[in-house]
Image: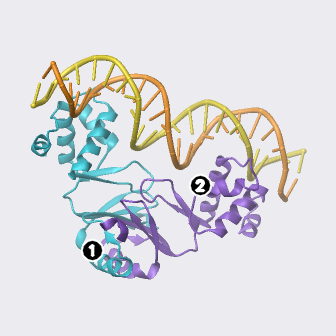
Chain colours: A cyan, B purple, C yellow, D orange
Amino acid sequence: MLAELRSRGMRITPARRAIATALLARSHHTADSLVAAVRRRHPDVAPSTVYRFLEALEEIGLVRHSHLGHGPAVYHLADERHGHLVCESCGGVTEVPEAAFSGLRRKLRDLERFELAPGHFAVTGLCGTCQS
Amino acid sequence: MLAELRSRGMRITPARRAIATALLARSHHTADSLVAAVRRRHPDVAPSTVYRFLEALEEIGLVRHSHLGHGPAVYHLADERHGHLVCESCGGVTEVPEAAFSGLRRKLRDLERFELAPGHFAVTGLCGTCQS
DNA sequence: ATAAGTGCAAATCGTTTGCGTAGGC
DNA sequence: GCCTACGCAAACGATTTGCACTTAT
């Protein structure tokens, strides 16, 4: 991922190295959890640096983010292909393999000319635990 | 809807009457569009009043809201049964009949014990216009 | 008369932006 | 040395909250 940056003329800094490491280490990150992870070793990295780098990574197409319900946005690598089930009650997020959505994808494409986001989408509902 | 309030001992005020009217008149409202609608006739209704009343209506179960992508939340009556297709590029929202999701609903119930929100859910993707 | 509902202003939360400086190339 | 990326602080948009006052019941 850093190589990709360099090849585009972008600079490699300690902050960027640390953010990249954190992104590779865990599949779901909020901006906040990234700041926290980075600050363990580089205590004065600013939130704005994280936001700006994430934005750059999204432009390049290496990272995606989703707004899952109420809280902050969630970031993950663009090549992770899965859907998100977001519980409206507890806010919990479950990952589901992309394949579970192939039927819906076909239907929406036919019905509405709508293309389900490849490798990344969210549906809302109630998780097993909250159905009581 | 006002009758429902009264039966629960909640009070009917001019602001509430106006908010209720606006909710019945259009199927998708942001808090802002509600404030604007209400202010046409009652110019000094405060946003906080709208937010508080919406919260009360959600507790009762008459109204639901969703966070569709980046912008402000969208409110609608709880008995409107449909899904939302949210375009990641332009932010546009398309309504789809609930039936389009019955296959997915079954699959998620079996696979993950996850219950698709009845009458209200959103999936992200790209709308026809933005696919170019 | 009582307490639910209100308007206003300030606070909060997540995120963005402006600006002067540091440091990768 | 140049120019990108940085840290900081202030600005931002959406929403929430505290408080004194109004008003439906």
Q: Secondary structure at mark 1?
A: helix
The residue indicated by pointer 2 is B31
A23 vs B106, left or right, is left
Q: Tell me residue C20's x, y (percent).
A: 34, 18
Q: Secondary structure at mark 2?
A: helix
Callout 1: chain? A
Image point (35%, 77%), residue name: A108
Image point (45%, 61%), residue name: A88
Relative to residue A84, is residue B98 depicted above or below? Answer: below
The amino acid beneath tag 1 is Ala
Label at residue A100? 1
Give the quadrant of the C terminus of chain B.
Answer: bottom left
Q: Tell me residue B130's x, y (percent).
A: 34, 65
Callout 2: chain? B
Front position in the image: A87 or B81? B81
- Is residue B118 visible to the viewer in this orientation of the structure? no
The amino acid beneath tag 2 is Ala
Q: Quadrant of residue A11?
A: top left
